[in-house]
Image: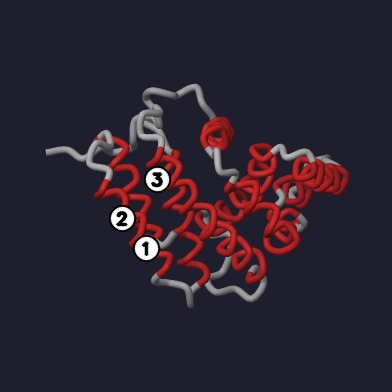
Amino acid sequence: MASTDLKRKLKQHKDTPETLAVRLHRAISWLKCAEENTSNLDLQFLSLWISYNACYAIDEKLEDDFTERKQFNEFISKLVSHDHEKRFHNLLWQKFSGPVRLIIENQFIYKPFWDAQRGEKVNWRKLFDKSIEDANRFLSKNEVAKLIEVVLDRLYMLRNQLMHGGATYKSKVNRAQVRDACNILKLFIPIIIDIMMENKSEDWGEIYYPVVG
C-alpha cells in the first residue's frame, strides 16, 4: 500500500486511539517522504527508517530498562502474531532470493565484522556464517519473527553507519546495501502500519514526544 492509501484508511478508522493515530500519522508522513525521494537512496533509506522508528519507538521513561534491540524483537513478535494473512512470510519468501538474501550476506553491515576491524578478538566470519545458516533455517521452518530480526539487525547497522557519519553521501562504496535496504523497507513498512491500524486495541506503547498544546 502507498502512503496515500494508508492515510485514507487511517482517516476512515475514526475510533483509533489518539496516541496510535499520531504514531501512524507520523510513520505515514515519513513513508511519503521516502516515496518522494526514490532517486536519492540515502534520503529514501533514512526516511524509511524514521517511518519504521515512528512505528515502534516507545517513551523511554516508561521502558527505561529496555534495550533498543529488545524493543525491536518484542515489536516484531507482536506484529507477526497479528499477521493472520501471513503477509510477512509471503514477502520474505518472495524476496529471499533477492534483497533479503543480499542484505543478510553483506558482511559490511554485520556488527562483528566491524568489531574485528577495530581490533576486538572476535571470529566474525564464523559468527557471520552461522547467522546466514540461521536465516535460512528460519525461512525453511517458517520462523518469521526470527528471520525479520536477522534482517533488521543488518539494517540497524546500516542505519548507524549513515546516522553517525560513517558513510559518505551518495557513496559508491555502499550503494548495494542501501539499495537493497530500501527495497526491503518500502515493502515492509506499509505492512507494519496496516497491521497496527487493523489492531488498534493492541497496546503499542506511549509515543515519543506527544503532541502538546
Pick the residue in front: 142 or 58: 142
If you read the primary sequence from the N terminus, does the residue marked by circle 3 or circle 2 appear first? Answer: 2
The numbered mark, 1 or 3, whose residue comes first in the sequence reads: 1
The image quadrant where one finds the N terminus is bottom left
How far apart marks 1 and 2 lie (CA) works out to 10 Å
> In terms of image quadrants, where is residue 80?
top right
Image: 168 above or below 77: below
Q: Is residue 70 left or right of residue 210?
A: right
| Residue pointed to by mark 3 | 54
Image quarter of residue 74: top right
Residue 24 drawn at (x, y percent): 34, 46
Identify the residue at image location x=68%, y=55%.
Answer: 109
Q: Which mark is residue 32?
A: 1
Give the distance between the C-alpha atoms of the residues marked 3 and 2, in whole angstroms.
15 Å
Indicate the amino acid at tag 3: Ala
Q: Nearer the viewer, residue 62 or 193?
A: 193
What amino acid does circle 2 point to?
Lys
Q: Secondary structure at mark 3?
A: helix
Q: Amino acid at mark 1?
A: Lys
Mark 1 or 2: in front is 2
Q: Are marks 1 and 2 in contact (CB under 8 Å)?
A: yes
